[in-house]
Image (cartoon, helix red, strand yellow):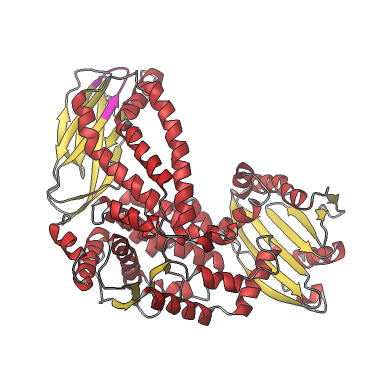
Amino acid sequence: MLLLVMVAAFVFLFQGRQTLEGQRDELATAVTGLDMTRTQLDLAFQSVEATRLGTGQELATAVAEAVLYEGQLVESQQQVDMLVSQVDGLTGELAAASGTVAANVANTPPESVPTVQIVSPSAGTAVTVGQPLDIVFAAADPAGLATLNLTINGESLRSYDPGDATLYTARETWTPAEPGEVEIGVLAVNVNGRVSNPTTLTLTVTATTQSAALSQLSSSGGPALRAEIESLVSQIRGLPPQTPVVTTLLTGDELRQRVENDLLAEYSEADAQQDVLVYAAFDFLAPDFDLYTFSRDLYSEQITGFYDPATDEFVVVSEDDVLDANEQLTHAHEYMHALQDQHFSLDLLDDDTLDADAKATLLALAEGEAMLLQTHFIQQGYVDLLDVSDILAALETPVLASAPPILANSLLYPYRAGQTFAQTLYDQEGYAALNAAWANRPQSTEQILHPDRYLAGDAPQVVILPPLTATLGTGWTLVHEDVFGEFMLREYLSQQLNSMQVDTAAMGWGGDRFAVYTNEANGALALALRLVWDTDQDATEFAALYPNYPAALFSTPSQLQGNGGECWPGPDDLICLFQTGRETLIIRAPDQGTAVRLLNEIRD
């Protein structure tokens, strides 16, 4: 029951670095756009000043996402420099937004509706009762704007008279009076009576501000501070605790030993060897890779704590029972898991009726929501980002740095993709959307990777494989049979295909089933992967692109088969592709005769 193990820094090292690289590229593109649009509008000084607070909030979010994934990311000086450079881009956000609106004006037909954009604050911003909030928005219409209306939860806050201007920007200061989810909306009407499409964003208003008490508690005894953090997490998430959470305090050495003992109790050398054979069948790992030792080392590296749903126990590092900023953030994240367990039951992670893809999906929902809560916790200033950065800068993660891509990416997936999924739902209806997601859980990694597929109800199709041991013959045994899922399919294809090919090939995944067999006498492996697709086009695109995989892997041309298949011979085995309608069958076998027998058995 260590699926929710909190592994300090090492899980988030690669994630943070990749995020920062992506943000660097996005910022470079944004700077180019800003240079083009900066001359289009000369925004009033008061509007720019009004966005300063929103910009600060955006910067906090950017820093949080870049350096505080799970509170464990190692921050390098180069990353700090990059984050500082984001200030200039963020302060130009209003100018960019207004430039976009102005550009839309030039390309908008006279009959079209007005264009509206809320510039500040950003969706998901957390504010507190009594804290003034600047709302900045821009509207445009080539025919001229007749009136604008700013609403809070559907109630008009203020109306504006643009005087038939084609472009209008406004700032309004609003102070929330009570906690809860708040929807800010802007509606514009042009001189022809045409009404803009609804433009809204959702904010979280909490009951308390960060008081001096929290900072004072930081240097005092742990129990009071932990209780305060738990109260804040409960308020932000809107989930009251149902029962007290048992907190076990261990030193760093004791915690590492606890994790190792629990991990080894649940994960034997035989289990590890079985996993290696499955990974090897898909080219992820060499057959002789020591996964058992690697896993032990990985889960012993820089651990800070974990929540155990089996015992409802919160195990944390506490050398002196005084929580530094990093430990405070860890406590907030892990306490979110405790609330999830009490309200939605995390015991499902150990449900043997769930396939591997479904378990990865549930884990992504749990970690994604906890990451979202952690971001809101940061936005409200409950931890000192500089203190956390200093602590994380001293951490090293040599084991993760040496991890094969499949192991590192599998660790990152629930946090990275899960947070995107959670944020997408939150942007629509706040935490109520997350409550709904727990009631109607996503069922596949496809739905996590593509939240629109979840919202559209695109459930995975059930795919079956017949037993193949008898077909393979004497000496063959089943290693493992399960659902591969879109996440793992993408990881598999990305070993030989470029990112664009992977996106095209994997899009439209409808369901699958795989089975891996081994011959104990000679160590040979056999693999059958049966895939179904949403549309004929999805199946055709996969069939057109997959041949690049075995061709690059083996560096050999294909051999067309009389049954319509295609095979690529390798040094020790061959890979075959068979396509029928919306179904794809990939077979890996020691020889062509074995591959044909497997094909006939599966298709019968």
The image shows residue 332 at horizontal and vertical percentages of 30, 63
The quarter of the picture where residue 167 lies is top left
The image shows residue 318 at horizontal and vertical percentages of 31, 73
Residue toward you, 209 or 475: 209
Q: Residue at x 46, y 61 (%)?
A: 10
Q: Is residue 294 left or right of residue 38?
A: right
Magenta region: which residues?
A: 138-145
Q: Which residue is drawn at 49% across and 54% down?
A: 14
Whether residue 409 is situated above or below residue 156 in the rendered picture: below
Q: Is residue 4 left or right of residue 155?
A: right
Residue toward you, 54 or 366: 54
Q: In this view, does 483 lie to the left or right of 86?
A: right
Is residue 124 located in the magenta-colored stretch of the structure?
A: no
Q: How many labels does the image show?
A: 0
Q: Is residue 418 visible?
A: yes
Of the 4 image quadrants, the one containing the C terminus is bottom right
Q: Which residue is drawn at 77% across and 49% down?
A: 551
Residue toward you, 598 or 28: 28
Q: Is residue 452 visible?
A: no
Q: Which residue is drawn at 17% across and 27% down?
A: 160
The image shows residue 384 at horizontal and vertical percentages of 26, 54
Whether residue 65 is situated above or below residue 114 in the rendered picture: below
Residue toward you, 168 or 209: 209
Q: Is residue 157 left or right of residue 365?
A: left
The image shows residue 440 at horizontal and vertical percentages of 41, 62
